[in-house]
Image (cartoon, rainbow, N blue to C red):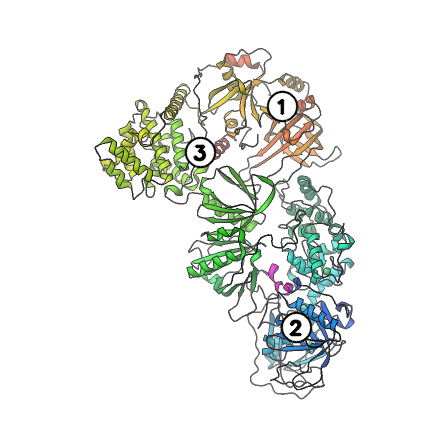
């Protein structure tokens, strides 16, 4: 049959390619080769061609279609079982005979063999034909409806095709599968034909035997033939040629043959030069096709890989590379729906780059069967899939299998985090990759610490032990989300109400996407202009507004963070960043600030759920979601939506109100556990933000840290204490109170300028981290730092606006009018200013109280502070006058409780008295501390503790105070009592007390009492030639912040010798599971009752390493069978830590006599221990940590 090509036909009929060759026509003038120069690369990646993100988005287009419902043919056979179909690589969804409506003018329907796959509806002359008469891209099908008897319409934008089935049932099934296949797809009106493949080469080519030229497109491993360029643009083609069976032969100057086993296509190019280009393009396509199927063929060589791991469909062409399963296209679609953090879906044929030799080998070694021995160990037959399962069944099964891990074979160590991690570290050194798979997906942390400096991670361990397959497997699972059974509502894909649909479009400038934070300035040249659209929850960017095929697309649901950059950070003045679930960062820029703000608002609206909607009303510089836990529930992490605006972090947690965290007022802000958790300790609450994804987490950390630092030169922009006083003011005043109250000329004498400048800078950088210490910092430097702070403070403490009023008040003669006016202005001040002013004036009031010693009376202080606080040149008498008034009438103006003030002065007097008696030691400030004798109820003693004081000295001092005689075998010791007396630790007699004072929390205290077991300990040790011990102990770990860890006691074999404590799984193990240096251990007697120790003979062991960059603390529990057993372990620890010197050789009495006894009794004054904030204490402790005897170090209040 000869085709009649009717250009005006509203219908579409194909030219007959395969009829007898007609005469050759000269190429018409209009024919031009339309080469698209942008698409020079061979990678089939139209969606992301300009940003290099090939990995996660490239097949979005084709896979989208997979997420709808699909049916396998009930009639007809599977494509792969048909001999003549081996070249047809896409999986056929349905095929069968249909009558197709004829071209215009003809009467009879034509019988056609019709096949549908995800991308095309094709129709053939016969069921034996390989090359179709027509193909319709499913992406262009806008509607499929039944019309009349047995008929249905396939509507595209430009043409309507009518098909007639043989039965009603058959017709309805075609309609259903076609509707399924095309619904929810991105509609196209014009696009590239090979979607989602980018054309590598295209243009008109003459096919011998045809009167007109054909528009020919080489895309990836296929060649498409179209009647003309218009048809190409609307997705209606003649046929596609799979190049894996092709061969190219140049036959003459302008012509060449594309030979396939089914037909020879003889093409004629316009010129010899063009022929050369066509030949090259087609040869590349063959190479692409061959190399593509090469991977698939190799993977299938393992026989179980030739059936889909999920539904057993034959010849699966896709793989979840992190889960190690090969799956069919339909299952791949459902995998895709799980998101890349659960399943990384790659094509065996198209994702050439990902298929390294190691990955191929990994898939051969594991294989679907072995992988399923883990993943599908317990599948109820009723839930199993078959190739004909519907998409709903597939979705449920695949979610159960991989998202929830419902069918997996549980590893013996399941639930035991440390052991899983440990087993992972051991196993990656051998070749058993299946065991690694099982460990990873039963919870072993791929990023856990191996404890080895040279190979800190399992990945590096695997590499070091030449286990490339292990390394490959680990590498693909570094960010994998683990199966989580508790997600019973996992079928619900949106746990939050969907954000409203937002639409926005316009031009933006975009750089290539990145896998790490943008640290460097991006010049304008690095941006490319892109047409961007936000529609139906998808943000897409296109080459231009004329293109309909996006260069890339991001689902709003994949966006995890949106950050608005500071102006002028990059070449474009206004830029913003989008972060995705799969850890990519996209940077966009525009010259128009309004355009940027519109985009930022629209994108935020598209991904922030309705419940967190208040966050959208903020003018936040960063908004997004993070996993977090709060102090109330550490077991389960939840999704939190965060917005950072200035120094306030707005947080919305599931089911609660949006709350504000004032970052500058945090007590603590730290990043712990190897940069995995950010801890924010604020007023009454602690929030743990988890770094499940590294990229946006690290950027959040940096932003939050920056926001928590001082934000400017105004008073309220400083880091503040809980009472709203700048930390710098609080620190300086505390320091002067402790060390400088009686210093002559305090605040008048100047410090060393360079040191003052350095102090100011340190405070400006992070006031919270600076701890002022006697010996290290000079009184006059600190006093001048405080003055400089106030002098340089923007707008001053009295505010620019109100300063003149204060000054004019100073000139009022009538005292009571003046005071009431001061009070009035005081109440007008912003809260921070008022609190700061009061703190400072109170301090100055105390300073002048000691003017007989420091020579700084009221007037002298006013001379100094007047110009400082009012920021005048010093000639204005009123400034000094005002300060003098404020100090003089402090009690009246600030309405101070007189008793309170007197108490404060008493404390200072006491400090002064102590200082006179005991000149400051070389290092460390003195601290007043509460110490109890024998029991807490028996009354407290206040003792000044100099930095050098040892536990023995403190013990003797308390005994002296109480006149308690020391008998021969009295082993008086100083104890650290913790956790409501459930744990205690006698300090070693040489141990310094001050670091302990700093480190103990509110539930702990120091107690002087006898050490009843010391005699037994010394006896035991003297009976042993060297200090070592081994034996079984019941072991348990502390829960980590993330809620992981061993939750019950397990028998372990321990060996303790001169330098390390090693733990073995059992006596026969020759490899320790864990190892700790003994000198870094702090051993407490007793275990918290709530941990349910199996016996009452327990030890709590604290391990702390003070490595500069990665301080680490762990706590675990050892439980012995008998008391003597526990004592022996304890004695051995002690002996090793102090080289056998556990008790003074000649006893306490001798020490007492040799000691000079200062009179330190001071009546019953109630003293507030003068301690700084938590952070300051930590820092002061850190200074002691270099001291070998200062075993102790920082500890927060909830741990001993
Ligand atoms: Zn399957």
In magenta, the rendered stretch is 55-64
Magenta-span inclusion, residue 1106: no
What residue is shown with label 2? Answer: 145
Residue 931: x %, y % from top left: 51, 21
Alpha carbons under labels 2 and 3: distance apart: 77 Å
In this rendering, the answer to whether 749 lies above or below 43 is: above
What residue is shown with label 1? Answer: 1135
Residue at point 29% right, 44% down? 801
What residue is shown with label 3? Answer: 771
Secondary structure at numbered mark 1: helix
| Between 396 and 283, the one nearer to me in the picture | 396
Q: Does residue 573 appear left or right of residue 966 in this picture?
A: left
Query: 10 Å neighbourhood of mark 3: few (<14), some, or many (≥20)?
Result: many
Q: Nearer the viewer, mark 1 or mark 2?
A: 2
Q: Write down the quadrant of residue 873 in the picture.
A: top left
Q: Quadrant of ligand 1?
A: bottom right
Query: 10 Å neighbourhood of mark 1: few (<14), some, or many (≥20)?
Result: many
């Amino acid at each position: 049959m000869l085709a009649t090509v009717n250009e005006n036909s509203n219908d579409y009929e194909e030219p007959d390619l395969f009829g007898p060759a007609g005469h050759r026509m000269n190429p018409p003038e209009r024919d031009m080769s339309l080469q698209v120069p942008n698409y020079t690369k061979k990678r089939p990646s139209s969606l992301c061609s300009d940003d290099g993100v090939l990995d996660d988005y490239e097949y979005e287009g084709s896979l989208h279609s997979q997420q709808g419902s699909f049916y396998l043919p009930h009639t007809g056979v599977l494509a792969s079982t048909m001999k003549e179909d081996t070249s047809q690589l896409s999986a056929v969804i349905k095929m069968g005979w249909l009558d197709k409506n004829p071209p215009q003018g003809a009467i009879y329907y034509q019988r056609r063999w019709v096949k549908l796959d995800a991308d095309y509806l094709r129709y053939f002359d016969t069921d034996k034909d390989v090359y179709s008469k027509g193909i319709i891209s499913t992406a262009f099908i806008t509607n499929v409806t039944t019309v009349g008897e047995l008929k249905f319409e396939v509507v595209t934008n430009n043409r309507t095709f009518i098909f007639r089935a043989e039965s009603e049932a058959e017709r309805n099934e075609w309609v259903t599968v076609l509707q399924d296949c095309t619904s929810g797809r991105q509609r196209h009106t014009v696009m590239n034909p090979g979607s989602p493949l980018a054309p590598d080469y295209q243009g008109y080519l003459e096919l011998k035997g045809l009167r007109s030229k054909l528009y020919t497109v080489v895309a990836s491993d296929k060649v498409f033939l179209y009647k003309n360029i218009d048809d190409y643009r609307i997705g209606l083609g003649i046929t596609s040629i799979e190049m894996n069976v092709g061969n190219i032969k140049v036959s003459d100057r302008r012509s060449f043959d594309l030979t396939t086993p089914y037909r020879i296509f003889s093409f004629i190019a316009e010129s010899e030069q063009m022929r050369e280009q066509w030949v090259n393009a087609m040869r590349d396509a063959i190479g692409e096709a061959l190399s593509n199927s090469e991977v698939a063929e190799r993977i299938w060589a393992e026989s179980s890989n030739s059936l889909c791991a999920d539904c057993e469909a034959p010849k699966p062409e896709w793989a979840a590379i992190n889960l190690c399963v090969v799956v069919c296209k339909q299952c791949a679609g459902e995998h895709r729906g799980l998101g890349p953090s659960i399943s990384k879906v790659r094509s065996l044929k198209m994702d050439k780059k990902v298929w390294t030799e190691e990955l191929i080998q990994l898939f051969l070694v594991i294989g679907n069967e072995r992988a399923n021995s883990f993943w599908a160990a317990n599948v109820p037959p009723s839930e199993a899939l078959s190739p004909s399962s519907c998409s709903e069944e597939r979705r449920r099964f695949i979610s159960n299998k991989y998202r929830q891990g419902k069918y997996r074979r549980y590893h013996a160590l399941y639930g035991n985090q440390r052991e899983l991690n440990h087993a992972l570290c051991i196993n990656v050194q051998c070749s058993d990759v299946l065991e690694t798979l099982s460990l990873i997906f039963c919870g072993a942390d791929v990023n856990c610490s191996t404890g080895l400096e040279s190979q800190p991670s399992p990945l590096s361990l695997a590499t070091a032990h030449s286990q490339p397959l292990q390394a490959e497997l680990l590498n693909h699972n570094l960010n994998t989300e683990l199966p989580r059974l508790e997600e019973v509502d996992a079928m619900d894909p949106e746990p939050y109400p969907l954000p409203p649909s937002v639409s926005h479009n316009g031009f933006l400038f975009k750089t290539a996407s990145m896998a790490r934070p943008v640290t460097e300035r991006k010049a304008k040249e690095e941006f490319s202009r892109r047409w961007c659209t936000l529609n139906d929850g998808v943000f897409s960017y296109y080459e231009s507004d004329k293109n309909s095929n996006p260069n890339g697309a991001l689902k709003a649901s994949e966006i995890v963070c949106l950050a608005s950059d500071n102006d002028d950070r990059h070449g474009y003045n206004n830029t913003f960043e989008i972060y995705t679930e799969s850890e990519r960062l996209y940077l966009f820029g525009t010259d128009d600030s309004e355009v940027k703000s519109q985009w930022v608002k629209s994108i935020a609206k598209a991904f922030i759920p309705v419940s967190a909607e208040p966050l959208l009303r903020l003018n936040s510089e960063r908004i997004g979601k993070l996993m977090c836990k709060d102090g109330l529930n550490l077991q389960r992490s939840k999704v939190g939506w965060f917005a950072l605006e200035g120094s306030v972090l707005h947080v919305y947690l599931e089911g609660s109100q949006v709350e504000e965290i004032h970052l500058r007022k945090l007590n603590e802000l730290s990043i712990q556990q190897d940069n995995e958790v950010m801890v924010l300790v604020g007023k009454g609450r602690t929030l743990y933000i988890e770094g499940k994804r590294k990229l946006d987490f690290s950027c959040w950390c940096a932003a939050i840290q920056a926001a928590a630092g001082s934000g400017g030169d105004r008073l309220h922009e400083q880091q503040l204490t809980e009472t709203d006083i700048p930390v710098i003011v609080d620190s300086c005043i505390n320091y002067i109170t402790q060390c400088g109250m009686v210093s002559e000329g305090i605040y008048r004498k100047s410090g060393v300028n360079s040191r003052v400048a350095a102090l100011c800078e340190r405070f400006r950088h992070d006031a919270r981290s600076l701890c002022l210490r006697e010996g290290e910092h000079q009184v006059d430097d600190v006093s001048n730092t405080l003055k400089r702070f106030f002098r340089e403070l923007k707008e001053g403490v009295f505010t620019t606006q109100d300063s003149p009023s204060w000054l004019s008040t100073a000139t009022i003669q009538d005292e009571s009018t003046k005071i009431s006016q001061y009070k009035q202005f005081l109440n007008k001040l912003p809260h921070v200013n008022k609190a700061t002013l009061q703190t400072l004036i109170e301090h100055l009031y105390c300073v002048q109280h000691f003017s007989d010693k420091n020579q700084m009376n009221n007037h002298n202080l006013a001379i100094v502070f007047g110009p400082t606080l009012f920021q005048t040149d010093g000639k204005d008498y009123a400034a000094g006058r005002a300060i003098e008034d404020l100090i003089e009438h402090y009690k009246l103006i600030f309405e101070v409780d007189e008793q309170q003030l007197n108490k404060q002065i008493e404390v200072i007097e006491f400090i002064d008295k102590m200082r006179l008696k005991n000149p400051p030691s070389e290092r460390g400030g003195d601290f007043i501390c509460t110490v109890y004798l024998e029991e807490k109820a028996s009354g407290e003693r206040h003792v000044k503790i100099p930095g050098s004081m040892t536990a023995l000295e403190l013990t003797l001092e308390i005994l002296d105070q109480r006149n308690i005689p020391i008998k021969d075998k009295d082993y008086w010791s100083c104890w650290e009592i913790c956790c409501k007396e459930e744990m205690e630790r006698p300090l070693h007699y040489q141990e310094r007390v001050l670091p302990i004072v700093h480190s103990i929390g509110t539930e702990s205290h120091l107690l002087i009492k006898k050490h009843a077991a010391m005699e037994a300990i010394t006896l035991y040790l003297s009976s042993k030639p060297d200090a070592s011990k081994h034996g079984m102990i019941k072991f348990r770990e502390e829960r980590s912040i993330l809620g992981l860890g061993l939750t019950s006691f397990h028998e372990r074999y321990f060996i303790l010798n001169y330098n390390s404590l090693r733990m073995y799984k059992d006596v026969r193990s020759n490899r320790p599971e864990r190892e700790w240096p003994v000198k870094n251990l702090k051993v407490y007697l007793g275990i918290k009752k709530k941990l349910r120790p199996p016996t009452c003979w327990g030890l709590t062991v604290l391990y702390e390493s003070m490595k500069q960059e990665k301080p680490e603390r762990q706590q675990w529990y050892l439980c012995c069978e008998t008391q003597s057993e526990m004592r022996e372990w304890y004695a051995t620890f002690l002996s090793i830590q102090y080289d056998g010197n556990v008790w003074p050789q000649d006893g306490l009495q001798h020490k007492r006599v040799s000691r000079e006894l200062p009179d330190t009794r001071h009546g019953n004054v109630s003293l507030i221990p003068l301690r700084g904030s938590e952070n300051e204490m930590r820092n002061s402790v850190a200074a002691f940590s270099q001291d070998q005897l200062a075993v102790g170090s920082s500890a927060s209040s909830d741990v001993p």
